[in-house]
Image: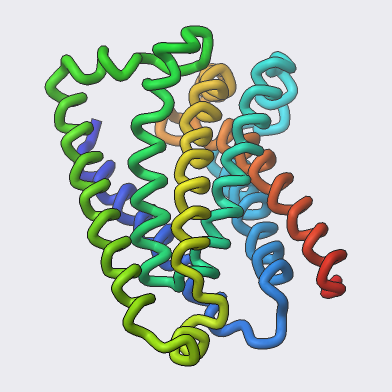
Amino acid sequence: MNPFLGVFFHWLGGLAAGSFYVPFKGVRHWAWETYWLVGGVFSWLVCPWVLATALTRDLPGVLARQDPATLGWTYGFGALWGLGGLSFGLALRYLGLSLGMGVALGYCAAFGTLLPPLLKSFLPAIPVAETLPEIAVSRPGQVTLAGVAVCLAGIAVAALAGLTKEREMPAAQKRQAIAEFNFGKGLLVATFSGILSACFSFALTAGNPIGETARATGTPALWSGLPKLVVVLWGGFTTNFLWCLFLHARHGTA
């Protein structure tokens, strides 16, 4: 185990997650649903499959050997997470890049940490290792919960800043800064996004048998999670694809 390598990958993932929306700011003539779908094709289909094929052994064979229930739960939770990711994009649309990132990602981190073990207390059969009380009695769990508290405090500060900004800015200036700025709607969508984004944790846990099969075929442990990530992202792409098709039909942008 190399904690420094883990921190590096965590930093790299955070950098990617925090900057993925930046190129969209340069799009001028496409509707939101068009460039969101194009980005999704590469983010949820192309890149995961290419990386999993390159870094694991016999990806199609690993997936073909899975029980239908494993694939179904992994894909299904991925689809619910996709709704969270979709509404995350809408939160950025209504709040802007800086405020939207702070609020939406904060909610994702907080709810993604708390909801799975909380639901485990009421639904013992769900694929989660520990309940929230079990996590709270351990030192690592206490540190994690303290981090969540700090995260929620940061959300409160960001939300207060956004509310103050909305009250102080004239309507014309709001529209000039962010074409569809709406603090109330954006905060509601960000909350919805954070709750559903917790399903990513459920999906990864449900896909553990996929990772075990990958390791059994000779894939290094470091990359054994990529095959189940492919299935999770298939689910996420499905919900986003259907929603974008609906918007294309509704707005006549297809």
Q: Is residue 89 left or right of residue 110?
A: right
Residue at figure coordinates x 69%, y 26% from the top left? 63
Q: Residue furthest left?
A: 139
Q: Which quadrant of the rendered structure holds the C terminus?
A: bottom right
* Residue at x 67% of width, y 54% of height: 46
Residue 129 horizontal side relative to residue 207, left or right: left
Q: In which quadrant of the rendered view does residue 243 lie?
A: bottom right
Q: Quadrant of the N terminus?
A: top left
Q: How many marks?
A: 0
Q: Quadrant of residue 120?
A: top left
Is 205 rendered above or below residue 185?
above
**Of residues 210 and 117, the one drawn nearer to the viewer in this rendering:** 117
Residue with the most extreme top position:
124
Query: Which one is in front, 12 or 168?
Result: 168
Residue at (56, 84) in percent of width and height: 26
User: Residue 197: where, in percent of width, then height?
Assistant: 50, 41
Residue 244 occupies quadrant: bottom right
- Residue 224 seen in render: no
Q: Is residue 29 visible?
A: yes
Colour mapping used in the image: rainbow
Where is residue 137 drawn, in percent x and y? 17, 15
**Residue that appears at 26% across and 46% down:** 152
Across and down, in percent, residue 136 comes to: 20, 20
Q: Position of residue 57 (x, y in %)?
A: 60, 32
